[in-house]
Structure formats: C-alpha cells, structure tokens
Amino acid sequence: MRLSADAIWLATAAVDMRTGIDGLSLHVQPALGRPPCDATAYVFATRRRTRLKLVC
C-alpha cells in the first residue's frame, strides 16, 4: 500500500493517542478550516512527543 500527500501539516497541540481518526479529523476542521480528506497528511503527537499519529 502506498500513501501520498500533497502537503504535510504538523499539529502543535498535544493529543490523546486514544483518539481515533474521527476525533483527530475534528481537530483539523476547526483549527485549520480545512477538510481532513484533501490529499494532505496531518501529524499529531503526544505531550512528550514520544508517539505520532498520521491522518492521511
């Protein structure tokens, strides 16, 4: 499986890694005013920056 993205956005606020894709998509819409399914990759991290989650 190959994923590609036109752009990559890094979230500056920490997120709870128990949050699923729907919850992370809800972070994207109000913060950036962008739809989460627009060929962009969004990267989220924990408070200590030890884990990452990618929504693409």
Image (cartoon, rainbow, N blue to C red):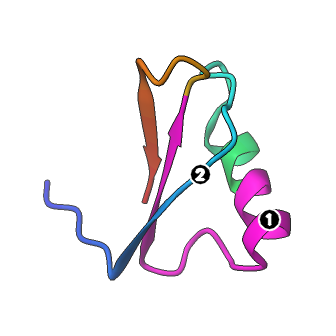
Q: Which circle marks residue 19 in the picture?
A: none
**Distance from the alpha carbon under mark 1 to that under mark 2:** 9 Å
For the magenta stretch, what is the residue range? Answer: 26-45
Q: Which amino acid does label 1 sit on?
A: Ala
Q: Give coordinates of residue 38: x percent, y percent.
A: 52, 81
Q: Is residue 40 magenta?
A: yes
**Quadrant location, the N terminus:** bottom left
27 up-or-down from 19: above or below: below
Label 2 sits on a secondary structure element that is: loop
44 up-or-down from 4: above or below: above
3 up-or-down from 35: above or below: above
Looking at the image, which residue is at 76% across and 53% down? 27
Q: Which residue is at the front of the view, 6 or 2?
A: 6
Label 1 sits on a secondary structure element that is: helix
Which residue is disc 1 drawn over? 31
Q: Give coordinates of residue 10: x percent, y percent.
A: 50, 56
Looking at the image, which residue is at 71% across and 61% down? 28
Compare marks 1 and 2 and give the one earlier in the sequence: 2
Which residue is disc 2 drawn over? 11
State which quadrant residue 41 falls in. bottom left
Q: Which residue is at the front of the view, 47 or 23?
A: 47
Looking at the image, which residue is at 42% across and 78% down? 39
Q: Do the residues labelled 1 and 2 touch (CB within 8 Å)?
A: yes
Q: Which residue is at the front of the view, 13 or 27?
A: 13
Q: Is residue 35 magenta?
A: yes
Q: Give coordinates of residue 9: x percent, y percent.
A: 48, 65
2 up-or-down from 33: above or below: above
Looking at the image, which residue is at 53% across and 17% down? 48
Q: Give coordinates of residue 20: x percent, y percent.
A: 64, 33
Q: What residue type is labelled 2?
A: Ala
**Quadrant location, the C terminus:** bottom left
